[in-house]
């Protein structure tokens, strides 16, 4: 099992958390499986940016992002050099420290109506 430390997030994880997930699990699935309800509007199909996280420690242990993920990350709110889409980043054996950004670009949640 690999440890993921989640830094405090006002809505999703106010006190932060420490979870253990099997290597090969996406960060998103690890969070969801431990009752941290990170947004994933595209159902983890790499078609949005709502599951964006910033990997504060252990970033270099992750496999490189594919081009489609890189293109989507350019649209993410609060993009940083260590940003990843949590649905695409698979946990290895190295512990990670992640931060879930305060905001996501999710038009439905932001109250925009579909036309």
Image (cartoon, rainbow, N blue to C red):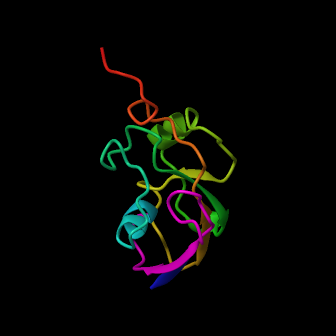
**Nearest to the observer: residue 80 or residue 68:** 80
Count numbered badges in the picture.
0
Residue drawn at the location 58% of the way across and 78% of the way down? 95
Based on the displayed image, in which of its 4 quarters is residue 78 positioned?
top right
Query: Does residue 85 sit above or below 42 in this rendering?
Result: below
Q: Position of residue 44 (x, y in %)?
A: 34, 50
Residue drawn at the location 43% of the way across and 65% of the way down? 36
Q: Position of residue 62 (x, y in %)?
A: 55, 64
- Does the magenta-highlighted stretch encompass residue 14? yes
- Does the magenta-highlighted stretch encompass residue 58? no
- The magenta stretch is 5-26
Residue drawn at the location 42% of the way across and 38% of the way down? 48
Q: Position of residue 112 (x, y in %)?
A: 41, 24
Tell me, yes or no, if residue 76 can be seen here: yes
Tell me, yes or no, if residue 5 can be seen here: no
Based on the displayed image, in which of its 4 quarters is residue 58 positioned?
bottom right
Left or right: where does residue 37 sit relative to residue 4? left
Query: Does residue 112 sit above or below 36 in this rendering?
Result: above
Q: Quadrant of the N terminus?
A: bottom left
Q: Residue furthest bottom?
A: 1
**Nearest to the observer: residue 25 or residue 12:** 12
Left or right: where does residue 44 sit relative to residue 83? left
Q: Quadrant of the C terminus?
A: top left
Query: Does residue 85 sit above or below 5 in this rendering?
Result: above
Q: Position of residue 39 (x, y in %)?
A: 41, 50
What is the magenta segment's predominant secondary structure?
loop
Based on the displayed image, in which of its 4 quarters is residue 53 positioned?
bottom right
């Amino acid at each position: 099992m690999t440890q993921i430390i989640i830094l405090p997030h006002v809505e999703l994880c106010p006190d932060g958390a420490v979870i253990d997930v099997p290597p090969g699990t996406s960060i998103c699935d690890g969070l969801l499986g431990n009752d941290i309800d990170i947004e994933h509007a595209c159902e983890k199909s790499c078609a949005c940016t709502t599951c964006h996280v910033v990997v504060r420690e252990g970033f270099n242990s992750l496999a490189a992002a594919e081009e489609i993920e890189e293109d989507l990350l350019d649209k993410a709110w609060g993009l940083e050099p260590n940003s990843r889409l949590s649905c695409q980043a698979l946990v290895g054996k190295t512990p990670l420290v992640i931060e879930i950004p305060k905001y996501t670009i999710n038009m439905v949640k932001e109250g925009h109506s579909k036309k």
